[in-house]
Amino acid sequence: MKSFFHIVIIGVISVVFVQCKNETKSEKSISRENTVHHAKGFSIENYDGYSVLRVKNPWPKATKSYTYILKQKNGIVPDSLEQNLIINIPIKNIVVTSTTHIPSLEMLGEEKTLIGFPHTDYISSENVRVQIDAGKVKELGNNHDLNTEVLLDLQPDVIIGYGIDNNNQTLDNLQKSGLKVLFNGDWNEETPLGKAEWIKFFGALYDKQKEANEIFTKIKKDFLNTVEIAKRANSTPTVLAGDMFEDRWYLPKGTSWGSLILKQANANYLWSDTSGTGSLSLSFETVFEKAALADVWITSGQFSSLTEMTNSNPHYAKFDAFRSKNVYSFNGKKGKTGGVLYYELGPNRPDLVLKDIVKILHPELLPNYEPFFFEKLK
């Protein structure tokens, strides 16, 4: 009987010891802190052997979020997370569907892992164009009608898609075919630094979180430094943005990232009092009434000269900014197949965009800086 009680006591002690040991190990191995601080659309939580990547705002007014488990070699994923999509990292190859994804791959030194893209002509990056010309990046057709046959043949580790709304039939079909699709909502961010922080999304996939954090920290530091420089300006020029497309004038809404950059550059953007992250759609008459006397005009990038503008719409010449030749465009920098570099790189490098705008509005504050994206139209 005495021996029996000894066995029971030893058993109880053993169970308690194992439980305490497991709990201690669990406590030490888990780091629940979200490593994303400016972007609202995703989060990353790092654990021992795996990370939890959550995409919370893949499109405007989204009602659902997505959880992805990024598993390191020999990592053990808890049973409670097994129902989520599990990605083995670092990934070896990738398909992306927006040009805004390209700079993150390039900054991380992973552009050679790109194996497919829809409308490759849109890509401006010189390094990626070398890969395309060598036949290493396959053409996938239209973004919302991706070539399923080619993708099934490629078998990429992941496909990075984006949604405009809840209707993503092509991406749903790809997932049903066994391919791994992750949603990226970088375009839906409201702030310049929020957009730029999505490099951490890609850093996690390549198991390069440290490198991604360092890149973003440098971009953030340079951006905030330029914000402080802009505060020294002695004037606040009025700014008109955008231009006509067909019969409507499109320009940034007042709480969009483009509007915020103008504000941080110490500009008086004439539609800053509107709300929303997309574009306003206005008539020519409405815009002219408010912006005829604007000091500076930053166009959408449709035009490369003042003559092109008046050929498109002679009424452009009525604006003061046009008459004084204070019209600026990012149309000049293109890839060799016509892709506009600003659309690709601008959202990822708000530090460069902000410097350009400050140089345009307050040239005395950055006397030695040459604009990267923008140039004055002639």
Image (spheres, helix red, strand yellow):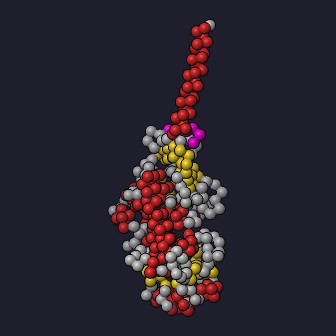
| Numbered disc total | 0
Give the residue furthest to the top. 1
**From the viewer's perspective, is 262 left or right of 342?**
right
Q: Is residue 33 above or below residue 377?
A: above
Residue 298 percent location from the top left of the image: 51, 80
Locate residue 264, reporting x and y percent: 54, 72
Task: Please provide percent x and percent y for residue 65.
Answer: 61, 54
The image position of residue 378, as x and y in percent, is 43, 87
Q: Is residue 188 above or below residue 305?
A: above
Q: Which residues are magenta?
A: 76-81
Residue 296 seen in render: yes
On the rendered structure, is 133 left or right of 33? left
Residue drawn 41% across and 60% down? Answer: 107
Q: Nearer the viewer, residue 11 or 220?
A: 220
366 up-or-down from 322: above or below: above
Which residue is rendered at x = 54% and y = 90% of the image? 320
Left or right of 20 on screen, residue 356:
left
Residue 79 lies in the magenta stretch? yes
Q: Nearer the viewer, residue 131 or 109?
A: 109
Which of the pair 243/98 is nearer the observer? 243
Specify the quadrant of the image occupied by residue 169. bottom right
Q: For this rendering, which residue is in front, 281 or 8?
A: 8
Residue 239 covered by magenta stretch:
no
Residue drawn 51% across the image and 78% down it: 233
Q: Quadrant of the N terminus?
A: top right
**Relative vertical location of residue 109 with respect to residue 327 in this rendering, above or below:** above
Residue drawn at the location 56% of the way across and 22% of the way down: 14
For residue 153, say whether it is visible: no
